[in-house]
Image (cartoon, rainbow, N blue to C red):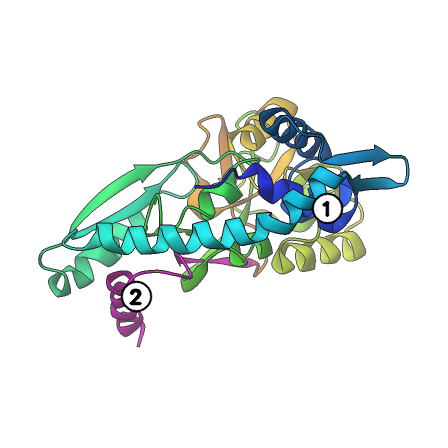
């Protein structure tokens, strides 16, 4: 209901710089600058002064800033009220599905508990695993879809949704089909010596950070290359095109036809589960409780 570029404006104001706001929003500083330019153009107002020491509010920006947080909270409450009204008599669960986070594990749950929801239907809603836009998709839980199911150890994701763990996927290594390691059935870490291993940079996943620390301290013969903070198809394409190895998961073995995904002689794994909105309606919470009952 409000212009979502206001979120960027508030972050820039609170942080005092484009770079710090970019870190908070998990986007690039260039994207922050473009969004601020777009907001100022849309409003026909100059909101901030850019200086070498940081950014500062103009008088017009100070006025907008005062009311922006109220506008955002008012819009959130209005949308929650409207969604609650729209759901009256609507017996449909909307389930997000994508290449890296397919809905199939949800279907396995559904057929175990659907007798408790006899009048309900499922509607699959596709979304893109774009590393720059995935956080905005997570924020649409409760709006665009009721549930997502997928891998989740991301602090940025978990700050935007509720998460019910269902199990774990093993961390594995993906390489191109022409790679020297491709014929192997299982890898030892020494097999990766001299290779470049692609994995997400530090800061968003405690599990990945622990693994990275272990590799850097005990296996410095493995070079590490940062990928985008969140995987999308471009990461798998780069793995296939460069001949690098990629830290991947057993559930992603069929994502890219040019790659093979190989188990590793280690115990590293990551949780997957059910994601839903912190402000989820009663029927969504009933479904979550039904799934919890299965786990007991």
The residue labelled by disc 1 is: 13
Asked if residue 295 is among those painted magenta in the image, a careful observer would answer yes
Callout 2–callout 1 Cβ contact below 8 Å: no
Q: In which quarter of the image is the C terminus?
A: bottom left
The x, y position of residue 30, in whole percent, is 71, 29
The x, y position of residue 267, in whole percent, is 56, 61
Q: How far apart are marks 2 and 1 (CA)?
A: 36 Å
Please state which of the two labelled residues, at mark 2 or mark 1, is closer to the viewer.
1
Q: Residue at x 90, y 35 (%)?
A: 52
Left/right of residue 163 with respect to residue 126 in the rendered view: right
Considering only order in the chain, which callout, 1 or 2, is on the residue closer to the N terminus? 1
Q: Which residue reaches farthest right? A: 52
Q: Determine if residue 93 is in view.
A: yes
Q: Nearer the viewer, residue 167 or 276?
A: 276
Left/right of residue 47 with respect to residue 185 in the rendered view: right
Magenta residues, start to end = 269-296
Question: Looking at the rendering, which quadrant does residue 54 occupy?
Answer: top right
Q: Nearer the viewer, residue 77 or 201?
A: 77
Indicate the secondary structure of the residue bearing disc 2. Answer: helix
Q: Which of 268 and 91 is in front in this view?
A: 91
Q: Which residue reaches farthest left? A: 118
The residue labelled by disc 2 is: 285
The x, y position of residue 211, in whole percent, is 67, 56
Above or below for 266 versus 5? below
Mark 2: few, some, or many residues within 10 Å (few <14, many ≥20)? some
């Amino acid at each position: 209901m409000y212009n979502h570029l206001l979120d960027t404006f508030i972050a820039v104001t609170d942080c005092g710089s484009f770079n710090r706001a970019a870190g908070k929003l998990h986007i690039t500083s260039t994207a922050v600058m473009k969004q601020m330019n777009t907001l100022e153009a849309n409003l026909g107002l100059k909101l901030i002064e850019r200086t070498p020491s940081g950014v500062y509010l103009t008088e017009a920006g100070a006025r907008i800033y005062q009311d922006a947080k109220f506008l955002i909270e008012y819009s959130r409450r209005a949308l929650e009220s409207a969604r609650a009204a729209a759901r009256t008599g609507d017996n449909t669960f909307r389930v997000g599905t994508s290449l890296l986070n397919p809905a199939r594990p949800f279907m396995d749950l559904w057929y175990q508990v659907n007798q408790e929801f006899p009048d309900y239907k499922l509607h699959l809603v596709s979304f893109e695993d774009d590393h720059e836009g995935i956080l905005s998709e997570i924020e649409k839980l409760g709006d665009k879809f009721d549930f997502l199911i997928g891998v989740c150890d991301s602090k940025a994701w978990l700050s935007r949704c509720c998460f019910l763990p269902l199990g774990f996927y093993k961390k594995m290594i993906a390489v191109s089909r022409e790679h020297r390691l491709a014929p192997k059935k299982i890898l030892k870490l020494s097999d990766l010596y001299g290779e470049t291993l692609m994995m997400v940079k530090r800061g968003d996943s405690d599990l990945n950070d622990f693994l990275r620390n272990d590799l850097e301290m005990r296996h410095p013969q493995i070079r590490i290359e940062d990928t985008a903070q969140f995987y999308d198809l471009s990461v798998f394409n780069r793995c296939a095109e460069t001949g690098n190895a990629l830290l991947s998961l057993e559930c992603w073995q069929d994502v890219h036809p040019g790659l093979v995904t190989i188990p590793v002689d280690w115990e590293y794994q990551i949780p997957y589960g059910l994601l839903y909105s912190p402000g989820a309606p009663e029927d969504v919470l009933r479904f979550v409780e039904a799934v919890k009952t299965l786990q007991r």
